[in-house]
Image: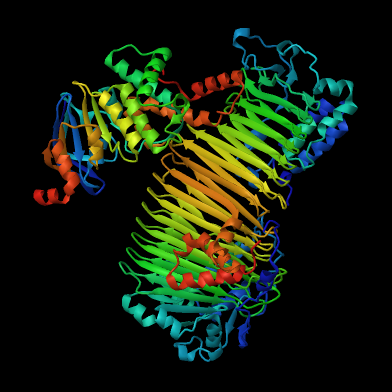
Amino acid sequence: MSTPQTDPTLEALVARKYRHGFVTDIESDTVPPGLDEDVIRLISRKKREPSFMLEWRLKAFRHWVTMQEPKWAHLRIAPIDYQAISYYSAPKSKADAPKSLDEVDPKLLETYDKLGIPLHERARLAGVAVDAVFDSVSVATTFKERLAQAGVIFCSFSEAVQNHPALVEQYLGSVVPYTDNFFAALNSAVFSDGSFVYVPKGVRCPMELSTYFRINAANTGQFERTLIIADEGAYVSYLEGCTAPMRDENQLHAAVVELIALDNAQIKYSTVQNWYPGDEQGRGGIYNFVTKRGECRGVNSRISWTQVETGSAITWKYPSCILTGDNSVGEFYSVAVANHYQQADTGTKMIHIGRNTRSTIVSKGISAGHGQNSYRGLVKILPSAENARNFTQCDSLLMGDQCGAHTFPYMEVRNPTASVEHEATTSKIGDDQLFYCMSRGVSEEDAVNMIVNGFCKAVFKELPMEFAVEAQNLLAVSLEGSVG
Amino acid sequence: MLRIDNLHVRAGERQILNGLSLEVGAGEVHAIMGPNGSGKSTLAQVLAGREGYEVTAGTVTYRGRDLLALSPEERAREGVFLAFQYPVEIPGVNNVYLLKAGLNAIRKHRGEPELDAFEFLTLVREKMKLMQMDESFLNRGVNEGFSGGEKKRNEILQMAVLEPTLALLDETDSGLDIDALRIVANGVNSLRRPDRSIVMVTHYQRLLDYIEPDYVHVLSGGRIVKSGDKSLALELEKRGYDWIKQEAA
Amino acid sequence: MSSASATQSRPALEHYRTVFERRFAADPLVSERRAALTAFLEQGFPTPRDERWKYTNLRRLETRAFVPGEAAPIAFDPQHAPWIAQAGLRFVFVNGHFAPALSSAQAQLPGVTLVRLADRIKHEPAAACDYLSRASQQPLSSLEQLNAAFFEDGLFVQLAPGTQLDQPIHVVHLWTDQAQLGMSHPRLIVRAGADSRVTLIEQFISTGAVESFTNAVADLALERGAVIDHYRLQEESTKAFHIGHARVAASEQARYALHDLALGASLGRLDLTVYLKEPRAHAELRGLIAPTGSQHLDTHTRIEHIAPHTTSSEEYRGIADGRGRGVFNGKVLVHPGAQKTDAYQATRNLLLSRTAEFDAKPELEIYANDVKCSHGATTGQLDATALFYLRSRGISETDARVLLIRAFAQSVLASVGNAAVREHLDGLLAHRFGSLEVSP
């Protein structure tokens, strides 16, 4: 093990193909590529949106055209031609929106089966309500009735715009304004669908809510938008999973997620992201440029982000918390994998505004092949944040000698009663650790998995059970044969 | 010397001491025993002036003064000394430097002349011999990198140098092996004087084999539920704490 | 990349062009200087849009029309020299110009070549060109170009292989109270031959509270097994602007140690880069950044592990008081192939007032897998437990705070071996952070 080279038997495992790489042959209703105000009007009209939505989209578009694409120091990125992307692609089906699973195109359901999320069984067995977003339109939502009894609104964004326009108008863009960044502005202008959740006062959402995203059509960007509001004393746990088929070209995914927690409310948001990462040579794969932000607007509120990012050619995402309410808590738990030519640039921002606000950041980056993994995080303590506390632990694991692991933490402290702590380590899988496991009869591959999973344990334990298992499997697949 | 009357103490939402009363006369050695969580350490901390505790009722009178009205350093200057259960490490602050600053502050308060470097070192070396500590200790940071035993010996060394009137020993025996325990106990015994009182907080009877108390008290549920002489400690060793809890109830 | 100058006020840059033409039109190095000036004018002053200048805005510096400082006589009581007395072989530069009367008598030291740059420019301009070249072949920043365009004096030190210089070289840069709006762009060039050893003390001071602008370059190269102990003491007046650049290239088994103190100036910034070029090269950086009043003190360090088996250890501490703002950005970069790199970095910062700010950014950029790299960063206030412990031993709260702050500051400078420097630092820290009421 002294020379850093890839084990040949493991090399074969590395070559294993992306499991979710298939294309569903469904007739799509796709808008021709290109973006101007007419396209936005078309999207808005197709969705029969009220005028406040169209106005908001147009404002966002007009702002977007004045903006420049961000240039991040550590991202190698081919230029994106925003006029070559189609901004709307809906699977054609009998009705405008299916009202039950029976109405959903059987081929779609087959697709979900291949992904391992059969809506019928799995959803029911696991007690999960799934809102599946296929390309850009929400196709099916289950368990609506049980949720309705509890008063929880869980529906596609389009439905929310039709049925709960007041809530949408009140909260949309209140955490991520359309001026926020290049991709958030683009999303605000063109987003086609997404999920909407409202948990009323004092309600503990009776089940985990789940959305599965999938990019299918070629040359489409996916711009979904998620808005979750937990009213006073409410609790909700939300899961999202993401996959995309294999394509040679890069596809763009620029989502926006906004979370709002009012007094004493808690939102737990978990992501397992497994978009197509591109092939071994770095061809194709998803550009995953996502803006996720939550605001702990009320006192004693809590927002937790947990993410397992194994896919995408490029990930650019910083799920953040604005801790406005006194005693509010923000958490970020992340595992990010960069294998082959993947580039993961992820992290968080914790903005402490209220008194006694606390934040915890645990980031585990795994780099293999030619992968580049960066943690980029900001902890900002404003003068008003009396007794604010932050703890950050940021660890990198390097597998192979061609990859990179980078840590860029920013700590801005403007209150003397605050305490901010950051620790970072970089290591490889120790030969002695491997040897110890193997001398107990464990195969090298299993030993690597054990050690990697041990490395990620602090994050996995934050995931809901069924997701934790999926995450561990994904990690194993993503890293097969990467031991150096 | 010390009179605690109906002391009620709360930490956050939790009521820890619940009407504790205790009288300690000059030259007496009291042992306070009790199960974990009975409030032993809280008592020691409150007497030394640790923040984070709220005295909701009761009084503590020390040599005729209201002890609770004094800041921690005023208490120290008045002769109250706490040997910590977990002495903190203060990297970068020299051990001797701390001790000298403390001693001279106390001497000044008493109206005694401050010691110069030579006098002070002579004094410390003499006390170090008592505690069987080596010279290198002089140049180290406060408790920095000390083993558990070294930290406890350091506490008693500080006591020997500062010569308190009332010494509170908080679990001074915990984490010590038998040799270290003997050294620490010898140190304490040599400091017994008719005008110096000692209150020891301990979970085990073991320490009392070496430092013989005049009185033994059992703390349970935040108050003293039984008092006696040394034989009470032996009985506790044999029978545990449960019978006393029952008796008290 | 858009040109920064396009967005900057042209007059600020034009001023430097005008001053340049007035001062250097007939200078022997005018063409080299002009190339540097052009490079500077193209890039302009860095702005906060540049990631490396995110926390430090030079607009206040830009808007002032600095002109080259002029030599001035200074009078002082030899018993109370403004510099560290008896620290070593002393070279004093007043307002940017060498002052022989204040400096140590020149003695021939075996194995040591000492050259004053102004002399060399005047008498051997061809040779002086060499001093514009750099130990590293890295592109220069715009402010380094500004230095190259305007430098007038400084020191070149060469140590023959095996030379062990017992006496430190003490370079003093002093601003007098006549130097309002004076600027100086000194250079310190050190070439330490194989197995040589030297202590450098750079001390930046002011005798008057004037708005001066120091833009100092240090360029150090360590051959195989060379050892440099480098003190950088920035104690200028709180009206001054101080910009420092240091680049250090270390060959096999060379050891570079920095003791860095940022205490003075209204706006202070140091950019230090260490290149560990060959196996077993080692860098050790220790620093204190202590802004108070309305000072803004920013230190950027960058350690590049280029070769395998290189090691570095870095610890910076910050103490921000008043409305002061401290910035520490420490980057450790491990190049591809630099296996067995061992790098440790720590930054600990204290905020002493409600209006102070500290921004810390410890960065790791790693392109090799068999490495041991870690960093830790904390920002907070004094440890309440330690404060209580001291008070329980009879020390007043004020004294306990002083003790802890001094200990916090001093520990990072504990490695200072030079007695004169140590005494000087103790005095500075006592002055800044106070002394005890009770004499210990």
C336 versus B172 height, above or below: below
> Taking B242 as reference, is A317 left or right?
right
Left or right: A18 in relation to B15: right
Q: What residue lies at 56% left-to-right and 19% top-to-bottom?
A: C423
Q: Quadrant of the C terminus of chain C?
A: top left
- Colouring chosen for the image of the structure: rainbow
Q: Position of residue C53 (x, y in %)?
A: 63, 43
Query: Is residue C206 shown to the viewer in this render?
Result: yes
Of residues A463 and B127, the one drawn nearer to the viewer in this rendering: B127
Image vertical order of residue C385 relative to residue A185, above or below: above
Number of numbered markers: 0
In the drawing, does residue C9 fall left or right of residue A24?
right
Q: Is residue A447 left or right of residue A82?
A: left
Q: Nearer the viewer, residue A28 or A274?
A: A274
- Where's residue C381, x and y in %? 43, 37
Q: Position of residue C196 (x, y in %)?
A: 75, 27
Image quarter of residue B182: top left
Residue name at image x 51 percent, y 30 percent: C409
